[in-house]
Image (tube, rainbow, N blue to C red):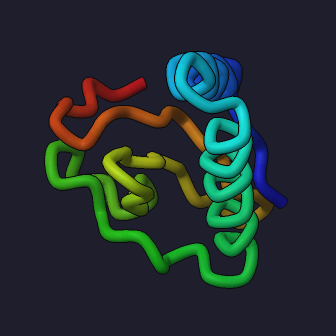
Amino acid sequence: MVIWSIPARDDLKKIHDYIAQDSKYYARRVIDTFIEKAELLTEFPEMGRKVPEIGDPDTREILIYSYRLIYKCSAKSIEVLTVVHSKRMFAGM
């Protein structure tokens, strides 16, 4: 099961709103891609790489477009922690 944290949901909304300034259609497609990739994590939780600046093997990331979808694996679920631009460092949660 994939759980989206409140900060991660806020991140998606901000990304959507930014892209929607130019195209509501592409904004929706980008968000759908994030959701589809996150759902894959239920079957392949280790498909992402370890977040380099964290060092915790359970905190991983997948790259989607120019963003980092950062998530934490547990025995019961996958929690999406945040979605940040790939040029930004992850400060942790």
Residue nearest the viewer, comparing 17 with 42: 17
Residue 17 placement, left or right of 69: right
Residue nearest the viewer, comparing 66 with 7: 66
Q: State the quadrant of the N terminus.
A: bottom right
Residue 59, above or below 23? below
- Residue at x 32% of width, y 69% of height: 49
The spot of residue 76 in percent (x, y) is: 79, 61
- Residue at x 19% of width, y 30% of height: 88
Residue 35 placement, left or right of 81: right
Residue 64 visible in this rendered orientation of the protein: yes
Residue 31, above or below 23? below
In the rendered image, which quarter is residue 4 located in?
top right
- Residue at x 62% of width, y 52% of height: 34
Q: State the quadrant of the C terminus.
A: top left
The spot of residue 31 in percent (x, y) is: 67, 44
Residue 15 visible in this rendered orientation of the protein: no
The spot of residue 83 in percent (x, y) is: 47, 36
Residue 8 placement, left or right of 39: left
